[in-house]
């Protein structure tokens, strides 16, 4: 049920995300401002989860927080249709509001999903949800490609406004499905029969903090799609109407990689994130140095692999490291660290884009590769922790 909710919600806001870069360019925003507000949106979308994660653990009001967050998250998208009369600052404000809604609903929703995933394994559970999620993320940009193509490019701003209004339809469907899911499964915690915790110690284990350090470096170097779309539109490597199709390709790769690496995580643990991050770290030179469409498409596909890993394995790993009664808080801290470094990295990459694209590429690639030793250390600690259990079973 949550996967279906994710399908229609991603159709809404990932559809919007696929065209927001060219839209802001038409409204008069610079690359630095796009980088700043994209990063600030991600910071709000992740950092505020520290608060909402704690609230969800304390109140156990998982469904209420999820529904409130989705309402804000989704209804800000059609409001972007008003931006041509109000300016790029208004559009950026709606993007920040959309990310705030995601911050409110994400820890509670992730906790609900972790309860249900207990029956099938966290890697597979989150990967299945991510696959449905990315079907929506794949269809949304294609829907907007169709709208922009049929509307024509004579009045681009008018075409973009219509595209955002069309996204009100899947937004309303999402909220209806969410209410149905709450009615059918009012007590999701019953799916997870594991003990709340084994000790009274409120501290998280060292592997969690090494893992969080790796996530921070990965987030800092991972460029947001609006900046990449801005670049591809600015150098006219693709027509503006094709940009949403590129995002659909990335989301299709995202879905497939989520399933592959999610299953790999259940078998190999953090080795999955090490492999996925090493592959996706190479996306930026393919995109920002491209003079032909083919390398740019390869870069988009590598970026999609990274997104698939982030949306499935990263959450699954937190579920495996933290007892269920502290997951809301753990997801909140995790997302706060991710958001802070995504914001700083996005802002820096936006400024580097205006100053020196080669410096942007170096920063992006080196930061992501620097995350690998921290993932490796977290993996080593988890393996060491599992050894006594393995020995006792063998005896």
Image (spheres, helix red, strand yellow):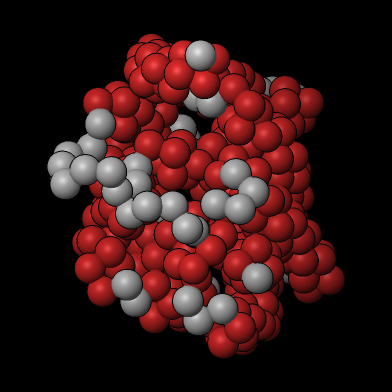
| Residue shown at the point (47%, 76%) measured from the top left | 187
**What residue is at 34 percent from the left and 42 percent from the top?**
322
Give 64 or 71, whichever is nearer the viewer: 64
- Percent position of residue 8, x then y: 66, 70
Q: Quadrant of residue 50?
A: bottom left
Side of 295 where 209 appears, left or right: left
Q: Is residue 186 something that shows in the picture?
A: yes
Indicate whether 179 appears above or below 378: below
Name which quarter of the figure residue 9 lies in.
Answer: bottom right
Picture layout, residue 253 above or below residue 291: below
Tell how many labels.
0
Q: Is residue 90 above or below residue 29?
A: below
Residue drawn at 65 percent across, 70 percent down: 1
Q: 229 or 136: nearer the eye?
A: 136
Image coordinates of residue 367 in percent, x first then y, are 38, 20
One can see residue 358 in this view: no
Question: For the point 44% across and 39% down, which residue is it?
Answer: 320
């Amino acid at each position: 049920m949550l996967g279906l909710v994710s399908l229609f919600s991603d159709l809404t806001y990932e559809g919007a995300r696929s065209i927001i870069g060219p839209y802001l360019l038409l409204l008069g925003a610079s690359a630095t401002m796009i980088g700043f507000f994209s990063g600030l949106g991600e910071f709000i979308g992740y950092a505020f989860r520290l608060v909402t994660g704690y609230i969800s653990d304390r109140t156990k009001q998982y469904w209420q927080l999820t529904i409130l967050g989705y309402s804000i998250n989704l209804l800000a998208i059609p409001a972007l249709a008003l931006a041509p009369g109000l300016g790029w600052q208004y559009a950026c404000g709606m993007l920040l509001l959309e990310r705030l809604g995601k911050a409110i609903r994400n820890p509670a929703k992730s906790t609900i999903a972790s309860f249900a995933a207990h029956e099938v394994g966290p890697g597979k559970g989150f990967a299945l949800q991510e696959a449905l999620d990315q079907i929506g993320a794949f269809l949304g940009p294609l829907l907007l490609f169709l709208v922009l193509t049929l509307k024509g490019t004579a009045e681009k701003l008018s075409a973009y406004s219509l595209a955002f209004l069309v996204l009100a339809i899947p937004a309303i469907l999402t909220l209806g499905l969410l209410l149905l899911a709450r009615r059918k499964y009012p007590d999701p915690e019953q799916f997870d029969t594991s003990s709340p915790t084994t000790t009274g110690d409120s501290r998280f284990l060292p592997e969690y903090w090494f893992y969080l350090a790796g996530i921070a470096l990965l987030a800092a170097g991972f460029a947001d799609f609006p900046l990449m779309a801005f670049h591809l539109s600015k150098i006219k490597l693709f027509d503006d109407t094709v940009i949403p199709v590129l995002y659909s390709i990335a989301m299709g790769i995202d879905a497939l990689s989520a399933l592959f690496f999610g299953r790999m995580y259940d078998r190999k643990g953090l080795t999955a994130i090490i492999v996925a991050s090493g592959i996706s770290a190479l996306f930026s030179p393919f995109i920002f140095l491209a003079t032909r469409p083919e390398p740019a498409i390869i870069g988009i596909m590598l970026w999609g692999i990274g997104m698939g890993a982030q949306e499935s394995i990263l959450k699954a790993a937190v579920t495996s490291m933290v007892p269920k009664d502290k997951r809301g808080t753990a997801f909140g801290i995790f997302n706060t660290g991710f958001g802070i470094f995504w914001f700083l990295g996005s802002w820096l990459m936006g400024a580097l884009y205006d100053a020196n694209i080669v410096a942007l590429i170096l920063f992006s690639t080196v930061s992501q590769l620097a995350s690998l030793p921290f993932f490796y250390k977290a993996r080593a600690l988890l393996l060491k922790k599992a050894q006594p259990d393995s020995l006792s079973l063998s005896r």
